[in-house]
Structures are given as structure tokens and as C-alpha cells.
């Protein structure tokens, strides 16, 4: 249940960032690697798909605590 909830929270966060530029800047500010930030930002409109893959490395459990 916790894993599903964090998955949805990551998707909501991506939705709030809206555009690719904003997503990229926010991920870099959170300490994401270059290729992770670029990959997520390129497909920024696929909230549910992105929230389960590379975004897990940036928005970890500690981020939501």
C-alpha cells in the first residue's frame, strides 16, 4: 500500500511541475543525475509511467518523509 501511495505522489508531483523545463530544473535542484533529469523531463507528460521508473531514484522515501 505504501509503495502504491508513493507512486501516486510522484505522479502528482510531476503533474505540478507541468513542463519539461520546470521538471528538469526541479530534478537537478533535488540532486538528480544529468541523464535522469533529462530522461524524465523529455517525457514529462507521462506522469504515471515516469513516476514508477527513474523518478524513484530522486523522489525516494526520504523525500516524502
Image: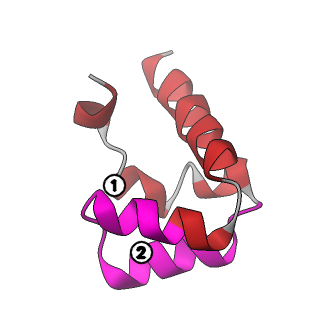
The x, y position of residue 60, in whole percent, is 31, 42
- The relative height of residue 13 versus residue 17 in the rendered view (above or below) is above
Magenta-span inclusion, residue 38: yes
Residue at (44, 68) in percent of width and height: 25
- Residue 1: mark in rendering: none
Magenta-span inclusion, residue 6: no
Q: Mark 2 points at which residue?
A: 36
Of helix, strand and loop, which one carries label 2? Answer: helix
The x, y position of residue 6, in whole percent, is 48, 29
Residue at (24, 63) in percent of width and height: 31
- The quadrant of the rendering that contains the C terminus is top left
Q: Name the residue under label 1.
A: 58
| Badge 1: residue crowd in 10 Å (few <14, some 14–19, many ≥20) | some
Of helix, strand and loop, which one carries label 1? Answer: loop
Within the image, what quadrant is residue 45 found in? bottom right
Within the image, what quadrant is residue 9 found in? top right
User: Are the residues flagged by discs 1 and 2 in contact, CB closer than 8 Å?
Assistant: yes
Pick whichever of labels 1 and 2 is earlier in the sequence. Answer: 2
Residue at (53, 22) in percent of width and height: 5
Q: How far apart are marks 1 and 2 (CA)?
A: 9 Å
Q: In terms of secondary structure, what is the magenta stretch mainly?
A: helix
The magenta segment: 24-45
- Left/right of residue 41 with respect to residue 31 in the rendered view: right
The x, y position of residue 47, in whole percent, is 70, 51
Of residues 21 and 63, which is closer to you in this image?
21
Extreme residue toward the right, this view: 45
Amino acid at each position: 500500500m505504501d509503495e502504491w501511495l508513493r507512486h501516486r505522489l510522484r505522479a502528482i508531483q510531476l503533474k505540478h511541475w507541468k513542463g519539461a523545463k520546470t521538471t528538469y530544473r526541479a530534478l537537478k535542484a533535488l540532486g538528480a543525475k544529468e541523464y535522469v533529469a533529462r530522461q524524465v523531463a523529455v517525457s514529462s507528460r507521462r506522469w504515471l509511467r515516469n513516476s514508477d521508473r527513474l523518478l524513484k531514484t530522486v523522489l525516494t522515501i526520504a523525500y516524502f518523509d
